[in-house]
Image (spheres, rainbow, N blue to C red):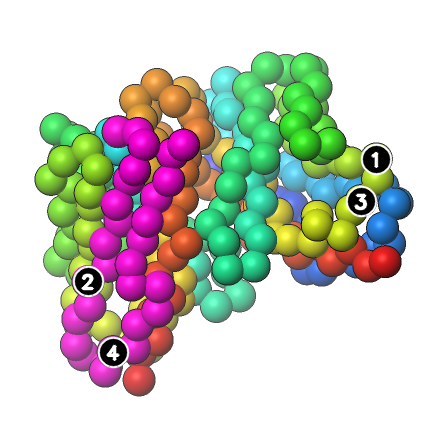
Amino acid sequence: GDSVTQTEGLVTLTEGLPVMLNCTYQTIYSNPFLFWYVQHLNESPRLLLKSFTDNKRTEHQGFHATLHKSSSSFHLQKSSAQLSDSALYYCALSASNSAGNKLTFGIGTRVLVRP
Amino acid sequence: GALVYQYPRRTICKSGTSMRMECQAVGFQATSVAWYRQSPQKTFELIALSTVNSAIKYEQNFTQEKFPISHPNLSFSSMTVLNAYLEDRGLYLCGARDRGNTEVFFGKGTRLTVV
């Protein structure tokens, strides 16, 4: 079945430094949708980025990611971390665009940004 | 905007008893509702996917007899955990989306403790 592997555990970094969270996936589908969800403390997971286009950079709120089907990757990056970026980040995969398809989540990466 | 309300946020039940959780979509039509469980130290695992006017699809290791789901209209879904035991504890998350939309909107989850 589908699977998503992402940077595990806690990533601690200093405000202003770059952030990179790795995400790779496995699926039999040739046109998967990849997502990054962010979950702040006591909040719902919220969509941060999504993509289904190979080699096209997608950006939102200072974060960016590029889906590379050749390496089955969708790494999340930000050039300068902010204190408010401290949260749980989930990479997720969906087989297609059709309503009703499930999301397969990675284990989640906790990011802690320190002053 | 689109919101998903999920309640209760926390619940404690005695081993062998049952509990029901509910999910309310506001601002969009919840054509598809997915119920996930996050057990301790694990990622979100899909329990079942419910699409209005279609049969509910349960994932392997999850059954309708254990996790009956109701999805009577485009704004509401509920799931019951029957005969809850220690292995059923965790955070239960509902995610809903509209037909043709790739974004899934999540509730804040129901945390189940079994004693």
Q: Residue A81 carries which label?
A: 3
Circle 4 crowding by C-alpha within 10 Å: few under 14, some 14–19, many from 20? some
Query: Residue A40, percent across and down?
Result: 58, 53
Q: Say which element carries label 2.
A: strand
Q: Are marks 2 and 3 on the same chain?
A: no
CB atoms of marks 2 and 3 within 8 Å? no
What is the C-alpha distance between the residues marked 2 and 3? 40 Å
Q: What stretch is highlighted in magenta?
A: B1-29
Q: Do labels 4 and 3 share a chain?
A: no
Closer to the camera in the image, A82 or A38: A82
Q: Which mark is residue A79?
A: 1
What is the C-alpha distance between the residues marked 1 and 4? 46 Å
CB atoms of marks 2 and 1 within 8 Å? no
Closer to the camera in the image, A10 or A63: A63
Identify residue type, mark 4. Answer: Cys
Identify residue type, mark 1. Answer: Ser
Q: Say which element carries label 3.
A: loop
Q: Which mark is residue A35?
A: none
Q: Which mark is residue B13?
A: 4
Asked if the magenta segment contains residue B84, the reply would be no
Residue at x 68%, y 15% (from the top left corner): A56
Q: Name the residue under label 2.
A: B20
User: Taking the image as drawn, is residue B46 in sight?
Assistant: no
| Foreground: disc 2 or disc 3 | 3
Measured along the vertical axis of the image, is residue B36 above or below residue A18?
Answer: below
- In the image, taking residue A30 as reference, residue A61 lies left or right, namely right
What is the C-alpha distance between the residues marked 4 and 3? 41 Å
Query: Residue A91, percent across and down?
Result: 58, 40
Query: Residue B90, percent across and down?
Result: 39, 66
Q: Say which element carries label 4.
A: strand
Residue at x 41%, y 54% (from the top left corner): B108
What is the C-alpha distance between the residues marked 3 and 1? 7 Å
